[in-house]
Each structure stands twice: as C-alpha cells, then as structure tokens.
Amino acid sequence: MPAVVPFDPPPDSDAAVFAAARREFLFPTNIAYCQTGTLGASPREVVSALVEGIQNLERDLPDWGYLQSDGEPLTGYQPLTDFRAEASAFLNAPATEIAFTQNATMGMSFLANGLDLAAGDEVVSTDQEHPGGIDGWKLLAKRRGVVVKELPLLPALKEGPDGVVKLFDSAITRRTRVVMFSQITSSLGIRLPARELCALAKQRGALDRILEVTASLA
Ligand SMILES: Cc1ncc(COP(=O)(O)O)c(C=O)c1O
C-alpha cells in the first residue's frame, strides 16, 4: 500500500493559513464541518475565553455589589460601551447603533417588531431565509396583514448575481417598506449580491434595508 504523504503546504500560502486555522477547532480533524451559524464551531481561543469567563464570574460573585457606582442596580443591561466601540470599528457602524442580542433570531425579531408596519405594507425577501430571519416578518403578516414576499431564489441564480437583482427589482413596489435578505443563506450557503441589492432598495425607495449577516460573520 502506498504511504500516505501528509499535506505540507508552503509557509505563507493560503493553504498554510487555513491548515493552521483548522488546528484551532476541537472536532476531529478528519471531519469537514461547514456550519457557521447557531451550531458553528468555536475556535480554541473562544472556547477558553468562555470557560475562563464563567470561572471568573463564579469566583468573583461575592464581590459584586448589587448597586453599581452610578447607583443603578446591576441588571445585566449595562451599556457595554467598550465592547460596542470594538464592534462598531469591526462593522464600520456607529457604536450608538450597535445592540447586543442573545442571538440572531432575537435581533431580527426586534427589528421586525420595532418597525411601524401596517396592513398592505410589503416586506420583500427570499424563500431561502432562515426562520430566525424571516419569522418575525411572517408574524407581522398574521397579526397586521403585512405582505411578506418570499421570492424564489434558486431559479434566479441561473443568471448569477444579475438574476438575483432582477428578481428583487421586479418584486419591489410602491408598498415595499422593507427589503430583507441574508448575505449568505443558511442552508445552501448562497452568497447574495448584498451591495447591489441594498443600492437597488435605496433607489426604489424601500424605507428599510435589512441585511442579515449571521452566516457571514460567524
Ligand atoms: C442566516 C441565519 N439567520 C439566523 C440564524 C439563527 O441564528 P441564531 O440561532 O443565532 O438565532 C442562522 C443560524 O444558522 C442563520 O444561518
């Protein structure tokens, strides 16, 4: 039997960078695991930080005052200004517009329920959205008669990114208030032309352009 030659990519190559990154994950090395969302694997550094954080919390609890220095009770709803500043630099968005939510579903549901949509207002999206992204809008359809258009994405892909832009273009009307889509879809990993779709929505006057980047950031 021929000997298995271990793959040894040249240093500084992309392959070497990916091989080094792969070693940071705890699941067995013979498995290719592509989920980057809810069940996305965390690298060692993140796992260690989480474990360390919980240990520190449990150790230091007796020293925590119920009231903070500003007199407010320690509710867990602190402004977390430093973390928001870091996130804002990474996302290129104002820190005042950054909110930390428990997960993507909660964030998307806040957005849907925070907008003042009425019967007949339209939300234009695709049929490839994760329930966590689309269900908040579907709830508005049930409760308030908002119209959710789930455009069939797969046939449009035959024409590549232009086909996707055309699909949205043909679905947006004067009643469209929201254009919402995932930059990378959850189950098939389709990358949508986010820049072009946001520009289209702006040009066509959709008031709210909501780009879900759960799988892109994970
Ligand atoms: C595009 C997309 N939206 C939403 C979710 C749900 O994320 P969460 O579990 O953080 O609410 C996922 C999870 O995989 C996702 O891929």
Image (cartoon, rainbow, N blue to C red):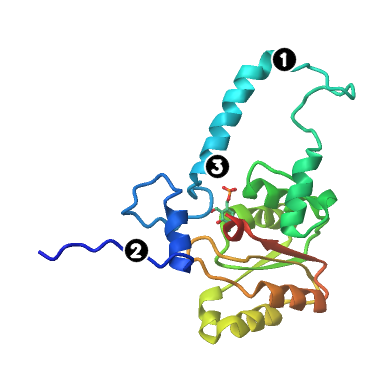
Q: Position of residue 66 (x, y in %)?
A: 78, 17
The residue to which callout 3 is attached is 46
Mark positioned earlier in the residue sequence (3 or 2): 2
> Are discs 3 and 2 less than 8 Å apart at CB?
no
Q: Position of residue 152 (x, y in %)?
A: 56, 74
Q: Quadrant of residue 58?
A: top right
> For numbered disc 3, what is the local secondary structure?
helix
Mark positioned earlier in the residue sequence (1 or 2): 2
> For numbered disc 1, what is the local secondary structure?
helix
**53 or 39, which lies in front?**
53
- Dot 3: few (<14), some (14–19), or many (≥20) neighbours within 10 Å? few
Q: Amino acid at mark 1?
A: Asp
Residue at point 69%, 13% (across, down):
62
The residue to which callout 2 is attached is 8
**70 or 139, which lies in front?**
70
**CB at disc 3 and ligand 1 closer than 8 Å:** no
Look at the image and tell me in which quarter the C terminus lies. bottom right
**218 or 18, which lies in front?**
18
Q: Is residue 161 left or right of residue 110?
A: left
